[in-house]
Image: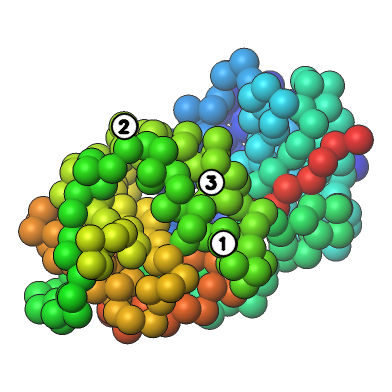
Amino acid sequence: MKIGSPGSWDKYLEAWSSCMRDTYWFTETRFFDYGREEATDELRGDWGAGDSVFLMAHDGESVAGCLGVKVRGRSGAVRRWEPAVPDRFKAAGVGEMLLGEAERRARDAGADTLSTTLRYPFSMDKPWLGGLYESMGFKDVHPGIQLLAGLEARSPEPSKGYDVVPCGSFSLGQLTEFTLRAFASTPEDQVIHGDNAPVSQPGAIRRAIEHQMSGGMGASPPELNMVAVAGGEPAGFIRGIVVEDGYRPRYGLLAILGVFPEHRRRGVGYSLTLELMRRFRGLGLEYAFVGTPWNDYEAQRIYMRAGFRPVHRISFYRKRLA
């Protein structure tokens, strides 16, 4: 088996398409999942970029696998659902060879970490790729689930004594402190969220808020960013985004929901979720999407009570390169 770089875009696209054909989403259009057109457009955008590396494995007669890696600064990222290896070659160590070569090239380019994201249907067993990453020393640093809701007309329940005010009524420093209170103030919270910097480390929290509020993740009008207030004091918050990507219906993304420990199990999170869904509906959206850590059972309970249903499992794999 030999590993090398492709000679041309057309040659690589043909090889990559052949290697991807056994992937469950590549030949079948799936609602709110990956699709062939989206993946091909993304590949075309990466092709020729100075920070991208493309590899092909060949057994002398046919292509046995493909892998693309993007290196930006000290971080390398493996493209989604890659290494792409046809079923008949998976037991031959092709995936291991491609990942090993990707690690070497990422190190040579200055990267000290290599990461990838694996998302698959909630009802599916962990794919072959998950076992491959783990066997190569990757750690699943943020396992989670993603949930989807149809925004059919519904009347939110009473707010149970909580008023809702815009996030814009508070400073960036206050919003940062709210996030720490909601995600990092109890031992239980730290078990779930402690290694997730955007909700547990002040600097990363500030950057995440600024990125979202400035439209870095999609349109985020002020009415989608709310704080619940009880007795004149903040009790929790929620922020939303309108996503338009051209591959699925325009939808609302529940970016973050946080409730302070002393106000939990009093309906704050549920009321905020319903209110955000109502506002999504008012913007003409038909669907809402949210992600949560696999072990944040309280958040999952709130979302499913509000009408969300699990659709995907998701793993964020990362490996430090020696």
Regarding residue 126, the answer to whether it shows in the image is yes
> Which comes sooner in the sequence, label 1 or label 3?
1
Regarding residue 246, the answer to whether it shows in the image is no
> What residue is disc 3 on?
198
Residue, x 30% and y 73% (percent of image)? 268
> What residue is disc 2 on?
214
Amino acid type, label 1: Ser
Q: For the residue labelled by badge 1, is the local secondary structure a helix, a strand or a loop?
A: loop
> What residue is disc 1 on?
185
Q: Position of residue 299 (x, y in %)?
A: 44, 73
The quarter of the displayed image where residue 218 is located: top left
> Which comes sooner in the sequence, label 1 or label 2?
1
Residue, x 20% and y 70% (percent of image)? 162
Q: Position of residue 119 (x, y in %)?
A: 55, 60
Q: Position of residue 308 (x, y in %)?
A: 33, 76
Q: Is residue 248 above or below residue 2?
A: below
Residue, x 33% and y 71% (percent of image)? 269
Amino acid type, label 3: Pro
Q: Are marks 3 and 2 in contact (CB under 8 Å)?
A: no
Q: Position of residue 226 (x, y in %)?
A: 24, 54
Amino acid type, label 2: Ser
**Residue 16 or 52: which is nearer the viewer?**
52
**Residue 243 or 183: which is nearer the viewer?**
183
Tag nearer the camera, 1 or 2: 1
Residue, x 64% and y 24% (percent of image)? 72
Mark 2 residue crowding within 10 angstroms, few (<14) / some (14–19) / many (20+): few
Q: For the residue labelled by badge 3, is the local secondary structure a helix, a strand or a loop?
A: helix
